[in-house]
Amino acid sequence: MSKEIYSKPSSNKSITDSNPVYPLSRSMLADIEKEIYKMGNSFFAGFHGYPRKIKFESQDSREQIILLLRRHFITNITWILITVLLSLIPLTFSFFGVLNLLPPNFQFMTYVIWYLFVLAYFFENILTWLYNVYIITDERVVDVDFVSLVYKHISETKIDKIEDVTYEQGGLFQSFFDYGTVAIQTAAEEREFEFEYVSQPSRIAKVLNQLIIQEEQEKIEGRVN
Amino acid sequence: MDIINQIFNINFNTALLGGLKIMYLAAIFFYIIFASLIIKQIYLMTGTLISSVSKRIELIGWINLIFAIGIFFFALVTL
């Protein structure tokens, strides 16, 4: 299991000392962009850098989404396999003649109803995967959770409230497909955020770290609202 | 005796299939409720995360509901 920790810089002074000239944050933005372009956009990895046509409910007009993350697609493997197995069960019914006692119209409706419920299972899972997202903007981190059918939980924290960013990757699957969990410790009411099973956790942690430094720099320059 | 057996069998089969029909219709009815909840959920989700595919996902939700209602009437007629 690999684990890395990025900590908030202990003092603001070191940042200004090492970069006395003004456009530090601009170069940092370029670094962040470079990092994100290295990651590339991937639907299956659940990873979108600078998504252009995506907004979220509480987004400010000047706020920009830097990363939109989902669980890695491979984490869906369990319910996908269950869906495939459930879809194949009626074939065994017809092979062993389980429904032969019923008239043909009842047999047909049994299959239809079976597949309706398989469809419901598929729908519920794909929607949960699509819309349970983690958003990193230039101002904050947002965790959108849809727990049950009509319940949503959104937690967010400002970048400048982030204390530590750690990530964990363990096991064969996580190493092979390069996904893991990024944990964010904050000084806000919501003490910890977890980006579970996201793709390229090391790079996400790096991007967050760069954003923290940039936010510090903005504070020093007095560009914070 | 054969006639009684035949009548009993016919009634028994009719009652069994009638019960099965009610069960099938109830199952589809539950699916319709579920499909309605899915639409509610989709609107909640697409309202939270607005993307270019939001409209398409909403459309899929509505098609699913219409399909379920269609199946209900189909079952009502054919069973």
Image (tube, coloured by chain):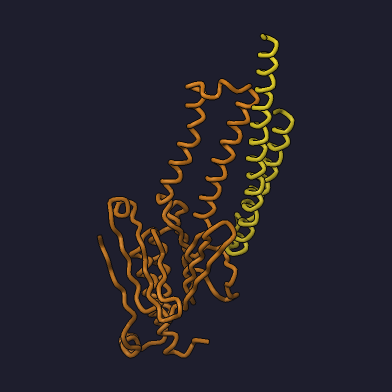
Chain colours: A orange, B yellow
* Whether residue A31 is visible: no
Quick one: A118 or A38, which is closer to the camera?
A: A118
Residue A184, how many percent across, how many down? 38, 72
Compared to residue A100, the image places residue A58 above or below, namely below
Q: Tag count in the figure?
A: 0
Farthest top residue in view: B2
Classify residue A72 as left or right of residue A60: left
Compared to residue A75, the image places residue A207 above or below, namely below
Q: Residue at x 43, y 57 (%)?
A: A71
Classify residue A118 as left or right of residue A205: right
Q: Residue at x 38, y 80 (%)?
A: A213
Residue B10, how many percent across, how many down? 68, 18
* Whether residue B57 is visible: yes
Classify residue B56 as left or right of residue A200: right
Q: Quadrant of the N terminus of chain A?
A: bottom left
Quick one: B7 or A155, which is closer to the camera?
A: B7
Compared to residue B48, the image places residue A164 above or below, namely below
Compared to residue A20, the image places residue A172 above or below, namely above
Q: Residue at x 35, y 57 (%)?
A: A179
Residue A206, how many percent across, how many down? 35, 70
Farthest left residue in view: A1
Q: Residue at x 36, y 74 (%)?
A: A209
Residue A222, how many percent across, how many down? 47, 90
Farthest front residue in view: B1
Quick one: A85 or A5, which is closer to the camera?
A: A85
